[in-house]
Amino acid sequence: MSPLADIAYAWLRAHTARVVGLNAPQGAGKTTLCAELVRRAALDGERWVALSIDDFYLRRAEQAELATRHPDDPLMAVRGAPGTHDVALGVATLDALIHDTCICRIPRYDKSAHGGLGDRHAPSEFSLVEPPIHRILLEGWILGFEPQGAGGALARVDAALSTYAPWTTRLDALIQLRMTDSTSVLRWRVEAEQKLRTSGRGAMSDEQAAVYIARFLPLYDVYPGAMAANPPVFPYLHLWIGPDRLPAEPPPRDLP
């Protein structure tokens, strides 16, 4: 169990929240953290289920059509930003898990498909989850972000965030991880693609990964700090992590 998982698990044990959100930067290890929490809960006799908002990205054809409709907006060209998810599918999946009355089908997304551009798996490859479910963990780098009235290059994604409210309102608690060094996300993304290539799966080159993640950096200047200043869900846990993805002291001055 990592030190970060120790902190998160102890905090979750102190609260009875059924649906828990995890907001953390891209590449920060959200999926790994959730997997550790699920394993720890199993040792304590509970079934926790983890899913990612990444699994609700638009299908590849839908993403390509979105990019065609907005050729002037690099945030719409690829998956990742607000507006590139099937929010309705996410809501339906969450509700099925919350009701916990039958086997649930969990969509899964293959980030290695189409040379790293990604695509949703066919329904036949969705994961099946049987009841009972004691706790649901939902993770995502934009999970819980709310519109801030941003204009310019962020106007479209800022407006799109309002459509994500049904995910936020279903959360009973929220954990937010923030970077002490905002440049970490670039290195983390390159490392993630390198691991995909090493495993023999389709992936972006280092250069493509850096270009991909750089387009999202302006969002980090606005939304994580706004969430920390006005959390949309309580109980709420705020933690800083360093470039090594381990718990860290807050930076000398608060970051955006």
Image: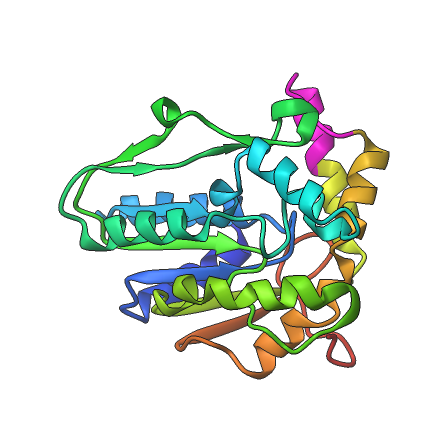
* Residue 11 is at least partly visible in this image: yes
Residue 108: % across, % down: 44, 34
The residue sitting at 65% across, 36% down in the picture is: 64
The residue sitting at 77% across, 59% down in the picture is: 217
The residue sitting at 71% across, 49% down in the picture is: 70
**Where 234 falls versus 183 (above or below)?**
below
In this rendering, position of residue 177 left or right of residue 69: left
Residue 16: % across, % down: 27, 68
Q: Residue furthest right?
A: 207
Q: Residue furthest top?
A: 200
Depth check, front residue: 244 or 132: 132
Residue 14: % across, % down: 32, 71
Depth check, front residue: 55 or 7: 55
Assess whether residue 145 is covered by the magenta stretch. Answer: no
In this rendering, position of residue 61 left or right of residue 53: right
**Where 54 falls versus 155 (above or below)?**
above
The residue sitting at 65% across, 70% down in the picture is: 223
Residue 49: % across, % down: 33, 46
Report the number of numbered marks.
Answer: 0
* Region rendered in magenta: 192-204
Assess whether residue 194 is covered by the magenta stretch. Answer: yes
Q: Residue furthest left?
A: 101
Instruction: Classify the position of the C terminus by image quarter.
Output: bottom right
Depth check, front residue: 12 or 166: 166
Q: Residue furthest front?
A: 69
The answer to which quarter of the image holds residue 8 is bottom left
**Where 33 falls versus 125 (above or below)?**
below
* Residue 7 is at least partly visible in this image: no
**Where 69 falls versus 181 (above or below)?**
above
